[in-house]
Amino acid sequence: MATVVPKRLSLAEFLALPEQASETAHLELLYGEVVEMAKPTWEHNELILGLGSLLKPYLRKHSLGRVSTDCLVVLDETEAVAVAPDMVYLSPERIHLLQRGRVYGAPDLVVEVFSPSSEVYDRVRKMQVYHRYQVPWVWLIALEPLHLEEYQWSQEGYTLVGAVAGDEPFRPRLFPELSLTLTEL
């Protein structure tokens, strides 16, 4: 679940917060508003760890860039926009965006895993933010029922280019040689 904290912060103030500013939530900053996200569940983390353990060796083998989980992405310093997608991928062409342990600019891919309580925030508000800052690819993964949707950026909005249920093979357009099944993660 996402909760907007009434206090507004600049990006510098947000970045100066202690890493564990909240014991029960992860923090994001959308246009100066602090948004508290509930800490992820066991199932959420297990899925992300599985996806990362599959993607990392694939990317390394093909020299396709780097992937990380729960990394702060600063999309706009002036407008105070900093999000923490569940997973972030940077191609070799965008690896320069990785500075001081954060991504400054639009990564090639963000992955968001959501539960029913966080679906509206991820599917509506964050997708609007990702579109504004031209993140080329977004994968939305629902835990209940387990499924994945692959979106590609276009001028008009994101286009759904693929969707699979948890037990169906997923072959992402971004990585055409890769195949994965969510239930196996």
Image (cartoon, rainbow, N blue to C red):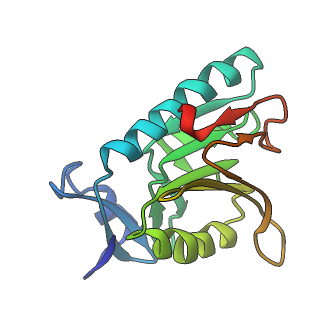
Q: Is residue 84 left or right of residue 33?
A: right
* Viewer can see residue 100: no
Residue at the (76%, 37%) spot, across then down: 93
Check the picture and name the quadrant holding the N terminus.
bottom left
The one nearer the camera, 3 or 169, is 169
Image: 150 above or below 88: below
Residue at the (66%, 39%) spot, across then down: 90
Residue at the (41%, 68%) spot, across then down: 118
The one nearer the camera, 19 or 138, is 138
Image: 80 above or below 143: below
Image location of residue 41, percent across then percent down = 31, 49
Q: Residue 159 falls in which quadrant of the image?
A: bottom right
* Viewer can see residue 13: yes
Residue sitting farthest toward the front = 167
Image location of residue 13, percent across then percent down = 29, 65
Residue sitting farthest toward the bottom = 6
Q: Residue 127 falls in which quadrant of the image?
A: bottom right
The one nearer the camera, 174 or 30, is 174
Residue sitting farthest toward the left = 23
Image: 62 above or below 140: above
Total number of numbered discs in the rendering: 0
Image location of residue 114, percent across then percent down = 46, 60
Residue sitting farthest toward the top = 61
The one nearer the camera, 32 or 159, is 159
Residue at the (42%, 45%) spot, across then down: 70
Q: Is residue 161 left or right of residue 86?
A: right
Image: 30 above or below 150: below
